[in-house]
Image (spheres, rainbow, N blue to C red):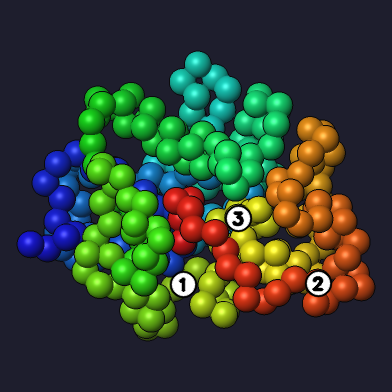
Amino acid sequence: MNPFLINEPTCISFSGGRTSAYMLYRIFEAHQMSLPEDAIVCFCNTGKEHEATLDFVRDIEKEWNVPIVWLEYTRNPQKFKVVNYETASRNGEPFAELIEQRSFLPNSVMRFCTTELKINPITRYMASIGHDEFQTMAGIRADEPRRVAKLRETLHAPLAIAGVTQADVQTFWASNSFDLGIEFRDKVTPLGNCDLCFMKGAYQIMSIIQQEPSRAIWWAEQEKKIGGRFSKDRPDYTQMMNFGKSQTDMFSKEEETIACFCGD
């Protein structure tokens, strides 16, 4: 059976990255370049995505003529709001609002940011349109075994089932008329998802800070407000900003980004 076929209420979780966009294309392809009526594409914006990610989501909507529901966490009674390209947060507002509400920082053990900024807004939105029960399709590839191993019963990974790898995804976008405007290197998209997410490898974060020091300011401000660190296993973001001015080899290049369900 074609794993990209949809025959029940489904949320297609689009992270704004190349892999989940490729998944969306394969779903389109399986349905004669359209979407079934009870399939909803959702993009959850944390406010810390690279501007090119938002551009890419907009381009997918326009070029493939697909409606995408843009969601953000908020402290209103619904705990989510629907936005669009023009009104989407770009300075970390949803993420900062969540941290302020929780009064502590997410970390690799208590990663409530994924739950509150990504999973729950989708669940609440789907319920608001009458889908209390639905499956979620996520862009997880066959060459991501740790993420595949953590799949929940209601989370469907058609790319993994189809044996799709990173190489397949890159081949597709290399021949496409448009692409995500973020560099792909060393088998990752360094600035994909939240720009300096604490789940990314320290070497990757430092490399970004050295190129764009201002990206660390928001993260450093959140640590100062709470009086803690996103990761206890490395310097805080203020220290990394300072180290970035003079240190180039503090962390091992081999340190991996920790697998999570925020996207690709």
In the picture, measured across the screen, residue 37 lies left or right of residue 20, that is left
Q: Which residue is at the front of the view, 153 or 113?
A: 153
In the picture, measured across the screen, residue 171 lies left or right of residue 108, that is left
- Could you tell which of marks 3 and 1 lies nearer the N-terminus? 1
The residue labelled by disc 2 is: 250
Q: Which residue is at the front of the view, 180 or 157?
A: 157
Q: Residues within 10 Å of mark 1 (few under 14, many from 20)?
A: some
Question: For residue 192, what is the image quadrant?
Answer: bottom right
Q: Residues within 10 Å of mark 2 (few under 14, many from 20)?
A: few
Q: Secondary structure at mark 3?
A: loop
The residue labelled by disc 1 is: 179
Q: Residues within 10 Å of mark 3 (few under 14, many from 20)?
A: some
- Could you tell which of marks 3 and 2 lies nearer the N-terminus? 3
> Callout 1, which amino acid?
Asp
Residue shown at 32%/50% (left/top)? 151
The residue labelled by disc 3 is: 199
Residue 123 percent location from the top left of the image: 36, 32
Can you see residue 186?
yes
Quarter of the figure that contains the N terminus: bottom left
Residue 206 percent location from the top left of the image: 75, 67
